[in-house]
Structures are given as structure tokens and as C-alpha cells.
């Protein structure tokens, strides 16, 4: 009797492991042994990897971005996993993803557990996230001043086994995939709009909760200043700016510098008094209206100013989460809840399953993995060490939710514990 399509796909099942990150980042001192971001707990005999990375059309040798540490004793798979039963994997990669289908990467292995050593201090040549002046750099972070311009936020990890299937754009395969994911993660939560995503300037004007501390003001002002200075320097797509546009940009620049000077010397996490809140919101709204008047005269869109504000609010809450404070006492609860909710498993649809593209990022080890292009097909005979899907928890270098970063290893090399030839693939839709 011929097998049904469902039975045929069932025969492709491979055991795999889902990786769930914490809803919010934690302080670097958190005792997690498996985590995304932060600083690696490297044994002293292992060097922080370096590689030649292309940035601004030139090659430079830099220390790679630390991506993840995974203590293999915490990963389920006894009896079936090809991974070592003990020891720790350390993942490093270039964070310059523009034009990099195979970004430089290194994976290190130590037979010791993930808590055996203290955090390794970042090397002086650690690359800025997204490289030097990269397109995906976070506009308000200064590589010379800000720790998180080079180091991702730290998220403890947990692991859940599931079965992965091999199919491409298949409704039956999608049904199987959804069944497995819901078995591992639950039925999911209703989809809710992000409070700060695609929010208009008018809605931000009516929101009296921001700015709630001085670090947020600093980030927002730096973001505005980055846009203004870029527009002044580059003109309008190769054409000189009009005198009117130049005058308006210089006015916005002067206002931003004034607020930046006001921020100097103030404690970043200090609350902002109501009068200053109102004054800053008024200035920011003036910037947004200024860019509305500059439409089709400068590269920056007015909507970019509002997008950056929402992202800066989320980034500020992440910074606060890394401090030993109760966030709810210092930030509006609606913002905190909104940010934490982004990692919750959302109820999948049939369409999601067919295309293996879900509203919650799926990070995993082993199995087939997923991606918008052909990396999973090209590496069918390899072992998937790690898949990280783009999501808003990460900084701009990997926040594109259509991107997927994979680390692949030849099965024979894995059996020999030889991680020297791991290959990374980055694909975006």
C-alpha cells in the first residue's frame, strides 16, 4: 500500500531541540550556564576568536561578536543526540551581515561545564555590532562609550525536545510541524499588536509615560543627531541639499546638541520630572514635524524618527533589566509587559506551518532547521549546531525577523569533536 503524504513526511522526522530565551535580559552576573549574548565563560586556554571582516569595502581583523554559550549537559537528547553529552559550546560570528551569505564564524568546544570559569573580559579589538559604521548599527550607541555597542544583552536559555520534519511549502508538513511545536510549547497565545511598533508620532505625543529616565533621552537625542548629521553629509541621493533643507537640518541639529549637553553629568537611570518630560516630548514632536516637512528633500523618512523612539524605549528597558533593580518600579508597566510579550509563543496558523515561518522566532539545535532560502537543503547531510532567527530581542545586526543564522558542522567532524571547520549561513527574505 502506498504511503500517504503525511506518512511520507513522518518518515523524515528527526529529533531536535527548541531553544527558548528568557523574556527579558539579565545582569552579566546571572549564573546561567547556557545563554545568548553577554560574555562567554571561556576556559583560559581558549582564545577569543578573530577573523578578517569586510566593513566599508575594506578588510580588518577584529575579535568576532559572541553569539551564544550552550552547556551541553542542559540540552536534552540522551541516547539519540550526536552532540557530546557534556561540555560547552561557544559560538562567535561576524555581525556585519550586509552581503555576507557565509559570515566568518568560529565555534569553540570545552569539555568543562558552562559555569566552570568566570566571564571573559571583551578584547580591545572586539568588533562593534554591525561593524564600523555599518548599515545595521544601532544609531544611538557609541562604540567608544557604550558597552552594548559591542556586546549583546544576555538571555538565559531553556531547552525542549521536539521532532523536526523535512518539507518545503507543504500544507501537510505544516500541520505536522504545528502539532509538534504545540506539543512542545503549548497551543500559543493570541497575536497582539506591538505597543511601540509602527506607532505614529501623534500617538507618542499623547503618551505621557515617556521619557521615564535620562538614558532614554540620551538614546533618542543621539538617534535624531545621527539622522541629521547623515542627511547633512550625504545630501539627497547624490544631489545637493536645498538651502531650505540645510537650514532646517541645522536647526534640528542645534536642538539635539542642546539636549545632549543637558544629559551630560546626569545619572542615566534617574527619573525625569514632569516639566522636563513635557518639554522633551514637545522638542521630539518638533523634530518629527520637521522631518515631515523635509519629505523628498532628505533620505530620512519622518516615520524613522517614530520607529527609533519605540526601539529606544525597548532598548532602555533592556538596559534597566540588566541592573539589579525592579524594572516595574522605574519604567511604565505597559512598556515592560509589551517587551516581555514579544518572546511568547503565538498561536500558529496553517499558513505559518506551510511556510515554516512563525510569528515567534524559533531557535533550535539539530533537526533540519528553517530559512527563507536554500541553506537547509544545501546542508542536509550536515548537523545543525545552532539556528538563531532574527527577532527584536537582538540589536539591529540581527533583529530582521526574516533572517536566519545557522551554524553547520560535518557529521564526521562532530564525531571527532573537531569544531574548526564549522560554517555559518545567513539568509534573509
Image: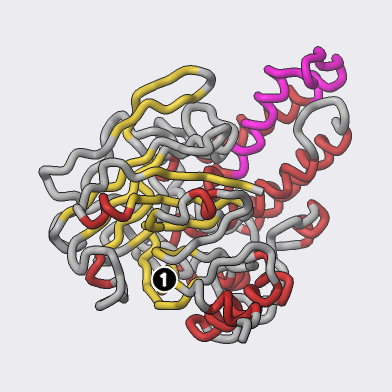
Q: Residue furthest front?
A: 1
* 11 vs 21: above or below: below
Which SS class for mark 1?
Answer: strand
Residue at 46% from the left image edge and 39% from the top image edge: 95
- Residue 68 rendering spot, x and y as whole percentages: 35, 54
Give residue 248's quadrant in the image.
top right
* 204 vs 136: above or below: below
63 left or right, relative to 373: left
* 78 vs 257: above or below: below
Give residue 149's quadrant in the image.
top left
Q: Which residues are magenta?
A: 220-248
The N terminus sits in image quarter: bottom right
Residue at 76% from the left image edge and 57% from the top image edge: 199
229 left or right, relative to 19: right
**Would you say residue 235 sits in the magenta stretch?**
yes
Q: Main secondary structure of the magenta part?
A: helix
410 left or right, relative to 290: left
Let me know if residue 315 appears in the view: no
Say which residue label 1 marks.
16
Residue at 16% from the left image edge and 43% from the top image edge: 46
Residue in front for this viewpoint, 119 or 57: 57
State how many labels appear: 1
Residue at 63% from the left image edge and 67% from the top image edge: 358
**Would you say residue 60 sits in the magenta stretch?**
no
Residue in front for this viewpoint, 66 or 205: 66
- Residue 322 rendering spot, x and y as whole percentages: 39, 59
- Residue 90 rendering spot, x and y as whole percentages: 28, 52
* 244 vs 83: above or below: above
301 left or right, relative to 141: right
Let me know if residue 171 appears in the view: yes
Amino acid at each position: 500500500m502506498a504511503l500517504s503524504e503525511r506518512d511520507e513526511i513522518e518518515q523524515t522526522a528527526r529529533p531536535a531541540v527548541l531553544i527558548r530565551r528568557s523574556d527579558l535580559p539579565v545582569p552579566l552576573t546571572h549564573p546561567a550556564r547556557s545563554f545568548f549574548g553577554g560574555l562567554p565563560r571561556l576556559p583560559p586556554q581558549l582564545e577569543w576568536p578573530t577573523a578578517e571582516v569586510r566593513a566599508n569595502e575594506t578588510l580588518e581583523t577584529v575579535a568576532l561578536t559572541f553569539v551564544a554559550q550552550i552547556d551541553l549537559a542542559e540540552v536534552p537528547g540522551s541516547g539519540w543526540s550526536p552532540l557530546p553529552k557534556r561540555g560547552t559550546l561557544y559560538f562567535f560570528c561576524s555581525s556585519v551581515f550586509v552581503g555576507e551569505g557565509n559570515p566568518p564564524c568560529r565555534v569553540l568546544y570545552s569539555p568543562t561545564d558552562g559555569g566552570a570559569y568566570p566571564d571573559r573580559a571583551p578584547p580591545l579589538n572586539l568588533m562593534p555590532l554591525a561593524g564600523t559604521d555599518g548599515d545595521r548599527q544601532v544609531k544611538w550607541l557609541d562604540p567608544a562609550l557604550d558597552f552594548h555597542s559591542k556586546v549583546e544583552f544576555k538571555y538565559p536559555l531553556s531547552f525542549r525536545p521536539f521532532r523536526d520534519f523535512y518539507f518545503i511549502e507543504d500544507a501537510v508538513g505544516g500541520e505536522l510541524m504545528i502539532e509538534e511545536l504545540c506539543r512542545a510549547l503549548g497551543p500559543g497565545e493570541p497575536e497582539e499588536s506591538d505597543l511601540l511598533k509602527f506607532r505614529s508620532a501623534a500617538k507618542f505625543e499623547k503618551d505621557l509615560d515617556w521619557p521615564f529616565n535620562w538614558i532614554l533621552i540620551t538614546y533618542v537625542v543621539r538617534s535624531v543627531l545621527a539622522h541629521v548629521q547623515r542627511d547633512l553629509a550625504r545630501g539627497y541621493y547624490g544631489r545637493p541639499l536645498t538651502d531650505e533643507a540645510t537650514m532646517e537640518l541645522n536647526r534640528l541639529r542645534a536642538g539635539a546638541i542642546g539636549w545632549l549637553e543637558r544629559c551630560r553629568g546626569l545619572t542615566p537611570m534617574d527619573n525625569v520630572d514632569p516639566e522636563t518630560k513635557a518639554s522633551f516630548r514637545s522638542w521630539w514632536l518638533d523634530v518629527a514635524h520637521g522631518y515631515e516637512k523635509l519629505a523628498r528633500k532628505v533620505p530620512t523618512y519622518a516615520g524613522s524618527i517614530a520607529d527609533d523612539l519605540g526601539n529606544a524605549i525597548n532598548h532602555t528597558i533592556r538596559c534597566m533589566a540588566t541592573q539589579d533593580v525592579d524594572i516595574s518600579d522605574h519604567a511604565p508597566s505597559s512598556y515592560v509587559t509589551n517587551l516581555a510579550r514579544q518572546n511568547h509563543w503565538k498561536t500558529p496558523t496553517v499558513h505559518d506551518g506551510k511556510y515554516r515561518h512563525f510569528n515567534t522566532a524559533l531557535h533550535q539545535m539539530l533537526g533540519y532547521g528553517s530559512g527563507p532560502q536554500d541553506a537547509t537543503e544545501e546542508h542536509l547531510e550536515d548537523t545543525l549546531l545552532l539556528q538563531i532567527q532574527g527577532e527584536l530581542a537582538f540589536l539591529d545586526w540581527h533583529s530582521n525577523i526574516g533572517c536566519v543564522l545557522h551554524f553547520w558542522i560535518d557529521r564526521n567532524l562532530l564525531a571527532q569533536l573537531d569544531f574548526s571547520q564549522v560554517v555559518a549561513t545567513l539568509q534573509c527574505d
